[in-house]
Structure formats: structure tokens, C-alpha cells
Image: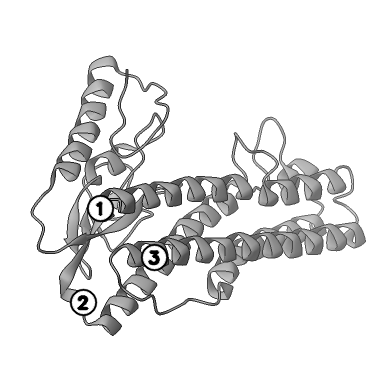
Amino acid sequence: MADPRFKSVEISLRTSEEIRRLFGRIGTSQNPRGLVLSAYRAALRSLKGKTGSQVLMDDSLITLRLSVLEAIKQILSKGLDIGMNQAETELKLWAVKAFGRIDTVDEAANAIVNIVDSQIQSAWAMSRMGAEEAVILGNAKRIGLLNPTVVTREAARYAALTVNSAYDNVIKESLKMAGDSEQFKKQAIAAIDDKTTDCCLRVHGQIVPLDGKFKLTGEPRFADEMDRPGFHWWCRSAMVLVPAWTPKDQLTLDMEKAASNELRAREETGKREKIHPSHARSGRK
């Protein structure tokens, strides 16, 4: 049977890749056909030259809201599945029965759609005031009120949070039911490549108690201490279980060394280089 420690890290790296794919489904510069970006693009196209019409504004903006809400619920529901599947698969490696689920994403979805609603209200107000089209839709010289950037960024934050919260919920509930809560800690795992942030390189491999907080020193970061990833905008990092009685093992030392080497290489060269395949111990050739 494969070593649970190595297998757990492999599973967490798959979760990291799944989080990256969720970002693509939201929409990024590399994935312009993501669902949220596509919804905004359709709204902007339908309103071109028509922002003075209240009827057309109503139709397009209501469609935008519904499209974003549907997309976000779909994406976050997938995030729940990813987090719970990681937890269940990992617990099986440690012979612990899985318990606990998170079944709704409504609160997170509504928080994101509230941003869309704010944009829509502002767009309606500007339309009624007879504002120039560029104020509402934007152009090459300015950002309009209907701007997807803040929405996609917030959606990505909630996507990563949903995955890791679902994982954390199942892990803690299952270990509590098994009476094993004191037998494990948690470890931060990052896939090392050209897109891994300074923040995630510096926290990579860090081990803390299940109810503890990871200490963050790199940039960008949301806070100095956090219960779980995402640690920053568009964060792909994940977590794994570590037996509490195990001292810092060779796997952890190798991960810390790989992260340190990448930080040093960036400092010495002043640039990032593509790393393929990316994983917990990957490095430049």
C-alpha cells in the first residue's frame, strides 16, 4: 500500500489543480470563455448603443444577474464536491470513516451577486441620468460600471474558500466522531510553478494543529494568520492531514527546500520561469 503521507500530498495537489480549473470556469485572462466573463461580455454586447433605453437596460441587466448567479452556484457546488472528495479519500488512507457535509452555497453565492447588484443599481441610475455609454459600459480609455474584474476576483476567493472549508468540515467532523482529533495536524500544500506566489511558497509545508492558524509572511496575503487557504486572491493552495506524533519528515523537508530554492532563484534572476510538471517538490531545471 502507498505511504499515506505521499498519497495525501498527491491528492491535495489534485485539489490544487481542480481549484485552478474552477478559476477557469469563472473566467481569467487565460480562460476568457469562463461563465462569469461570458455573462458580462454578453451583457455589454447587448447594451452597445442602447444604454438610453430603460427597457433594454432592464432586460440585459436582469439576464446578467441571473446568468452570474446560476454560474456561481454551479461553480461553488463543484467546489463543495472537490473539498469533500479530497477529505473522504484522504481519511480512507488513515482508516477513518468520513462524516459531515456542507450542502449549500447560497450564502457565498449571494455575497458575490450582491456585487453584481451594486453595479446594476449604479448602471440603472446613470442611465436614467443620461450618462454617456462609456460610463456604464467602459471603453479603451476607462473602466465602466459593469466591470467583471471585481466579481471574478471575489468569485475566485469564494471558490477556494468553499473547497477548503468543505475539506476542513469533513476532516474535523470525521476525526471528532472517531475520537482521533488529537492524533492529526494539518499541513499547507502548494504546487510550485511560475504562478505560485511568494505567500504560498513561504507557507508551503507548514504544519499547525487542526484548530490552529497558518502563519503567513509572504505577499500577497489576506491576513497574517489564517485557518485555511485561500490565502490571497486566486490562491490554489490546499491542505493535508499529518499525524501529530510524526516529527518533521523528509517529505516536509523536501517541500520546504523546493519552496526555498524557488524563492532564491526568483531573487537571483529577478524573474519566474515555467515549471512543468508542477508539484509539491518541483523546481527549475
Pointer 3: residues within 10 angstroms few (<14), some, or many (20+)? many
Q: Identify residue for label 2.
A: 180
Give the x, y percent position of residue 221.
32, 48
Q: Residue furthest top?
A: 269
In-front residue for pair 11/16: 11
Q: Identify residue for label 3.
A: 87
Give the x, y percent position of residue 248.
10, 50
Give the x, y percent position of residue 204.
25, 45
- The quadrant holding residue 111 is bottom right
The amino acid pointed to by label 1 is Arg
Q: Identify residue for label 1.
A: 5
Q: Which mark is residue 255?
A: none
The residue shown at (32%, 21%) is 284
The amino acid pointed to by label 3 is Ala
The residue shown at (27%, 76%) is 175
The alpha-carbon separation of the residues under discs 3 and 1 comes to: 14 Å
In this rendering, position of residue 283 left or right of residue 14? left
- The quadrant holding residue 190 is top left
Residue 132 visible to an observer of this rendering? no
The alpha-carbon separation of the residues under discs 1 and 2 comes to: 17 Å
